[in-house]
């Protein structure tokens, strides 16, 4: 349905009417039409969503709102349209060069907190496949005495990670380097974080993902396990005493990915999400 063919509703302010129209249009294109519409409007107004909702009745329609809606209707992810996404404690810049950080990935941060508990946190942190820098920067924000290294094969992603480190004030403790997983790294780390590409090459993805996010961040070979095969052979050497390595996995990869690390003589536990799916491998030395 064309945007202009949905009439304004009587009794509502212009912005409220626009939100209602936008939600109707976004229904078939998004799982979260209300949230999407509100985020677009707040972005166009250059204010927080909360402030916009409080002032809904007295706000005018900002310029360019329909153009933003049109982009979302073409399935561009909200985070790419507005150029940012919240992850853990941080708001991060997002471009088409990086994976949009997902709430599922925060499971790795929760697992890291559980591992270190009330003890001193990690001193040295490694994030393999850092993308926007989400995992490394969230962990460094949690543990202000720690320093960290983020690796990515994509220079364009590393540029975004560096911008995020600078914008969050974490840059003095975060270093970024181009690399192929852990090849050539000789240091040891207390905490290793890794959310590698793990989708099977033949998987059917929604257009929001397939058409807009980098293939390099998504696909892990014919069985989705390609990155874990490489990482299983590298990680043991990088673990300092008492260290943990945390890997995000697809919901059905707990056994197959876990066995790759067990075969490399490492100890593996699974961390499950609230739905009971294993979403994180917790890897330590035996
Ligand atoms: C699923 S994304 C994760 C991004 C970020 N860590 C997050 O959780 O939002 C995987 C990342 O791994 C990077 N990557 C893919 N192959 C790689 C390789 N061989 N070595 C290093 N990084 C790689 C991609 O460029 C991408 O940024």
Image (cartoon, rainbow, N blue to C red):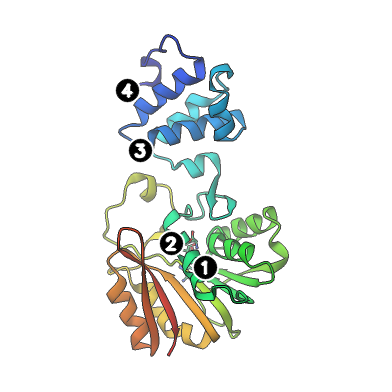
Marks 1 and 4 in Cβ contact (< 8 Å) = no
First in sequence: mark 3 vs mark 1: 3
Q: Which residue is mark 2?
A: 216
Residue 273 lies, in percent from the top left, at 36, 61
Left or right, residue 234 beside residue 150: left
Place residue 26 in its image quadrant. top left
Q: Is the residue marked by circle 3 packed among few (<14), some (14-19), or many (20+) residues within 10 Å?
A: some
Q: Is mark 1 within 8 Å of ligand 1?
A: yes
Which residue matches tag 1? 153
Comes first in the chain, label 1 or label 4: 4
Q: Nearer the viewer, mark 1 or mark 4?
A: 4
Q: CA distance from mark 1 to mark 4?
A: 41 Å
Q: CA distance from mark 3 to mark 2?
A: 24 Å
Residue that protrudes farthest toward the right in the picture: 172
Quarter of the image with the N terminus is: top left
Residue wearing tag 3? 30
Residue position for label 4: 1
Q: Pointers 1 and 2 in contact (CB under 8 A)? A: yes
Q: Residues within 10 Å of mark 1 (few under 14, many from 20)?
A: some
């Amino acid at each position: 349905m064309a945007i202009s063919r949905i009439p304004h509703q009587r009794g509502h302010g212009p912005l409220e009417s626009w939100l209602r129209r936008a939600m109707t249009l976004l229904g078939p294109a998004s799982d979260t039409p209300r949230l999407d519409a509100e985020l677009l409007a707040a972005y166009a107004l250059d204010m927080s969503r909360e402030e916009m909702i409080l002032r809904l009745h007295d706000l005018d329609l900002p310029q360019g709102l329909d153009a933003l809606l049109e982009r979302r209707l073409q399935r561009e992810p909200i985070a790419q349209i507005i150029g940012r996404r919240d992850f853990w404690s941080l708001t991060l810049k997002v471009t088409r060069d990086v994976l949009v950080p997902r709430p599922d990935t925060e499971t790795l941060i929760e697992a890291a907190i559980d591992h270190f508990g009330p003890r001193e946190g990690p001193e040295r942190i490694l994030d393999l496949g850092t993308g926007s820098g989400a995992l490394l920067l969230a962990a460094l924000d949690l543990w202000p005495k720690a320093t960290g290294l983020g690796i990515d094969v994509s220079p364009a992603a590393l540029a975004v990670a560096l911008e995020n480190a600078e914008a969050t004030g974490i840059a003095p403790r975060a270093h970024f380097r181009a690399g192929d997983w852990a090849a050539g790294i000789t240091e040891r780390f207390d905490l290793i974080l890794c959310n590698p590409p793990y989708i099977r090459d033949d998987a059917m993805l929604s257009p929001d993902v397939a058409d807009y996010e980098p293939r390099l961040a998504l696909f892990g070979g014919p069985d989705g396990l390609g990155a874990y095969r490489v990482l299983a052979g590298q990680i043991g050497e990088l673990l300092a005493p008492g260290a943990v390595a945390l890997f995000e996995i697809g919901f059905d990869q707990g056994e197959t990915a876990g066995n790759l690390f067990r075969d490399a003589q490492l100890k593996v536990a699974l961390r499950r999400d609230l739905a009971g799916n294993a979403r994180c491998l917790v890897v330590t030395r035996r």
